[in-house]
Image (cartoon, rainbow, N blue to C red):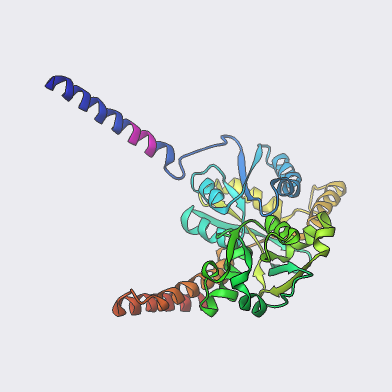
Amino acid sequence: MTDTRMKYTSLLRTFALTIALLTSLTFRPGDADANPGGLTMGFVAADSKELTLERWQPILDDLSKELGIPVRSVVLDDYAGIIWHLAMNKAQMAWVGNKAALEAVDRADCEIMLQVVNARTGNGYYSHLITSKDSPLNSVQDVLDNAAHLTFGNGDPNSTSGFVVPGYYIFARRGLDPKTLFKRVVNNNHEKNFHAVANGTVDVATNNSMALVRYQIHYPDQRAGIKIIWTSPLIPSDPIVVRRDLDPALRQRIETFLSNYGKKTTGKSDRQTTWEKQILAGRDWAEFAPSDNSQLAPIRKLELFKMRMRIQKDDTIPSETKEARLQEIDTRLKELEQ
């Protein structure tokens, strides 16, 4: 009996060690290669997945033709999923908002390569609060005064314009928490929040200027029934991030191709140039401009300001610890100003 138990215990240990080894091999960041001989670009469906692919598929097809390798897409409903795909090398590049780019840089071994330049607002765009045109709400103060009776459509926690920017400028600077302020808070992407306002299932919601331009085209009747009651300071345009370990020669070819997209260059036919210009114009984009991690400085500041306010208000933190944490944040803020 004792020998049987010992053998059984030994088998269990062996099995457990095998599983642990397989898990470490399977999920270690950077080891996975989901698309040998190809490239995968990640997207978050800030609108529907169909609209996201409609916007990007022609560009990915052109990029694939230029590189001579398959360029695939992965479209998910949340930023956390895209960051995970980047960290695990299941996607080698992605178009994301600034907050998600910050997470990708800090947690997924990525860096910013380019940013999308908007044809109307240039290297930036705006966060908005929207509500029904028939609503008595006409300002942020109206929303705050009536919050206890309102349902608020907030964005994905990793959305720059849907969550981080309005979260800082509207709530954090006033020491307010949307979760305790409103009767109810729901988190959705821009398109779902837009429809929720149009359908009356939420009273007020976050959105952004570029999304509202698209909805004017795709949902003109609903857009006509919605008004903007708050506009943020300018937000840097959404960047394209790439994994740092992407082959340098391949990265250079991608960057060159996208930087020249819509521009007449040596060897590019007039027909192809016209096609690319039409693709960009149809998305209200001007170009893909070079960028780097420095464009994240404003978002890092917002995150640090929010962290500072949380620590300042937390009475459970010992005074010496609180002072040290606040000093550390102030030092980081000064570094960002340089």
- Which range is magenta? 19-24
State the residue in front, 146 or 34: 146
Relative to 143, 59 lies left or right: right
Relative to 252, 226 lies left or right: right
Residue in view at x 60 percent, y 75 percent: 170
State the residue in front, 199 or 106: 199
Residue 213 seen from this side: yes
Q: Splitting the image into 4 quarters, where does residue 96 fall?
A: bottom right
Estimate the x, y position of residue 284 in percent, counting from the top left.
79, 60
State the residue in front, 108 or 128: 128
- Mostly what secondary structure, the magenta segment? helix
Residue 284 seen from this side: no
Relative to 128, say whether 68 is above or below: above
Q: Quadrant of the N terminus?
A: top left
Residue in view at x 55 percent, y 60 percent: 157
Residue in view at x 73 percent, y 41 percent: 61
Estimate the x, y position of residue 139 in percent, counting from the top left.
70, 78
Relative to 11, say whether 131 is above or below: below
Q: Is residue 137 magenta?
A: no
Residue in view at x 66 percent, y 37 percent: 70
Query: Which residue sits furthest left?
Result: 2
Q: Is residue 22 magenta?
A: yes
Estimate the x, y position of residue 265 in percent, counting from the top left.
79, 53
Relative to 180, say whether 15 is above or below: above
Estimate the x, y position of residue 315 in percent, counting from the top left.
36, 77
Relative to 262, say whether 68 is above or below: above
Q: Tally the numbered discs.
A: 0
